[in-house]
Amino acid sequence: MRKTMAFVFIVFFFAFNIFCVFFVKGLETASLSPVKDAYVDEDMPDSNYGEGSLLKVGYVEDEELKELQIFISFNISAFRYKAVQSVKLKLFCTQPYGITRTFQIRRITQDWNETDITWNNRPSVSSDYINVVFNLTSNDWWVVDVTSLYVAGETIGFRIADVSTPQYCENTFTSREYSDPAYRPVLEVTYEPYDVSGVVWWLEHIDLALGIVGFIMIMFAPTVAIHMLRNSDARGIIYGLLMFVIGLSFVMVWLWGG
């Protein structure tokens, strides 16, 4: 038994080191472009600004203060089975108002259309959020860590709103339709470059995995018992029977789960 355990340990040790040498890589970063973006205007509640080259957030003043909000979404399907380490939203500000404001970012939880979104039909958002200080005084990139809002899936979207004390303050950013691609919005995703889709699939079908393991245990139970008995180990019958019972229970879990 000790020799067997030592052999298993040695095999595991070398396999782990070979895996680390040939498969473990450093983090990689991908820059994603939006699939849709727009801003909505409380003063023009039925107007759509989805095809414009600019995004606006803050407050405008007509007879009274009215709010502006930004909505932006990205396709993240390529990272569904990746170990995502950080997510950063990068927007280029073309016209900062020049005073310190607090912007609140929430994840969008409802589907929306870039060419249909208005103030009156804007999508719902998550209860979790992050508040970020915005204090740019010149044209520059505004970079926000939104990792805490990241949820794996096909797409992820964010709503940006000014939650400071309302006052006239309109900050303007470029949209995905902006003329210069170098200044369009970006979602920067840093991740470990392993595709664990196979592992995730087995975890999602754990009953099938147990069934396969169960069949294998049932098949090898007699072999284990006979081998131990030939080596004058009376526990062979017990171990063989135990393997058979456990294997049978795994198969039953699979059958009932299916």
Image: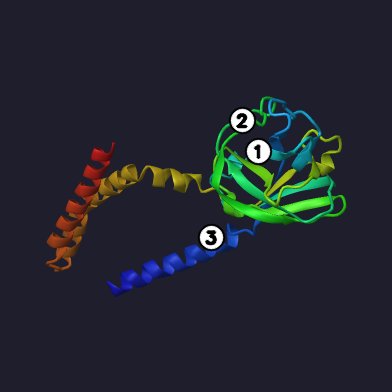
Q: Is residue 32 left or right of 97 when viewed as pictured?
A: left
In space, the residues marked 2 and 3 are separated at their CA atoms by: 43 Å
* Mark 1 lies on residue: 73
Q: Quick check: 194 above or below 172? A: below
Rendered image: mark on residue 17: none
Tell me, yes or no, whether the two marked residues, 1 and 2, touch with CB atoms within 8 Å: yes
* Mark 2 lies on residue: 112
Q: How is the image coloured?
A: rainbow
Mark 3 lies on a secondary structure that is: helix
| Amino acid type assigned to the residue bearing label 2 in the image | Trp
Q: Residue at x 79, y 35 (%)?
A: 62
x, y percent for residue 181: 83, 39
Q: Is residue 202 left or right of 117 when viewed as pictured?
A: left
Q: Quadrant of residue 236?
A: bottom left
| Amino acid type assigned to the residue bearing label 3 in the image | Phe
x, y percent for residue 118: 67, 29
Residue most toward the front?
Answer: 63
Rendered image: mark on residue 19: 3
Upstream in the sequence, badge 2 or badge 3? Answer: 3
Q: Nearer the viewer, residue 98 or 125?
A: 98
On-image quarter of the C terminus: top left
Q: Residue at x 81, y 33 (%)?
A: 53
In space, the residues marked 1 and 3 are separated at their CA atoms by: 36 Å
Q: Nearer the viewer, residue 226 or 18?
A: 18
Counting other residues with Cα less than 10 Å from the Cα at mark 1, is it few (<14), some (14-19), or many (20 or more)? many
x, y percent for residue 206: 35, 46
Q: Quick check: 143 above or below 1? A: above
Q: Residue at x 65, y 39 (%)?
A: 74
